[in-house]
Amino acid sequence: MVGADRSDEVSIRRFEWLLQQRGYTWCKEDRIYEVLCVTGKKPDFYVRTPHCSFLAELKSFREPSVLDRAIDLGQRVGVVDPGALQKRVNERVHEAARQLKPYSIYGIAMVVVLDNWRQVRLPLDARALIGLFGQLEFRGWYRPEEGKIEDLQLAHGGSRVLTDQVHRHVSAVLVNTGELRYPDDDMSEERPMWATILFNPFAAVPLPKEVFRSPADTHVWYEHGLGWVVKPAV
């Protein structure tokens, strides 16, 4: 099997469930030469929708996180660096973005798809996705003579994966999530799928919001004057 994570058939299958449930058609990595000229590693999917076509590169999580290891050791109290958890997410997005980069010449949308079907204890909510633009920090003006901080605002610090100059070919980052049925689910049986989608405000080719707009989906986007907005897709 050649494709997302080389041997991860489950994340590929789950993404196909998502696309099928939305009524989209697709071309997988092994036949992608039929729709574009291959340059370097082949993208995992070429997807056709009524709103646009896009390339998708899938990444899943294999190794236990520091939280998993702490639980395995029976630790009830401890300190976990949230930056270490975010780094795992950042690394997968950065890897996928590099693999998609050669195909930016086609001028179509590109989506990084994250799938945590193994249930590694990592944050993959809206806050973690926003963290791709830099570690979230509170910044303000300190008035030493008054001993107070003014104009406190949320801002992005270091550890950035997506910026106005880096990986602008990435249109969106999508977390693919499915309904779980039982603890030892082998993911062989289709179930309802939904997506949390972070839209890159710096994207050279934006992904239309209509592409993933099911009632169970969540949209995350940046709006000037408001900052980051997290809302149900409909």
Image: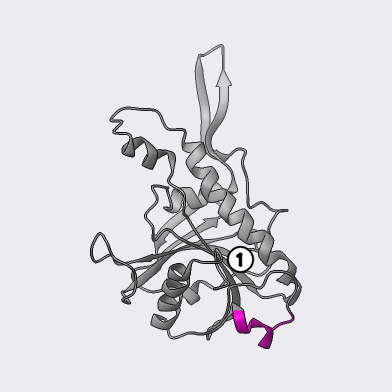
Amino acid type, label 1: Ser
Q: Does the magenta segment cover residue 165?
A: no
The count of marks equals 1
Residue 93 appears in the rendering: yes
Residue 128 relative to residue 96: left or right? left
What's drawn in magenta, residue-wise?
30-37
Residue corresponding to mark 1: 171
Question: Which quadrant is home to the N terminus?
Answer: bottom right
Which of the pair 165/227 is nearer the observer? 165
Residue at 55% from the left image edge and 32% from the top image edge: 139
Q: Which structural element holds mark 1?
A: loop
- In this view, 119 is above or below 169: above
- In this view, 85 is above or below 114: above
- In this view, 32 is above or below 206: below
Residue pushed farthest top?
A: 145
Residue 19 in picture, x, y percent from top left: 45, 79
- Magenta-colored segment: predominant secondary structure: helix
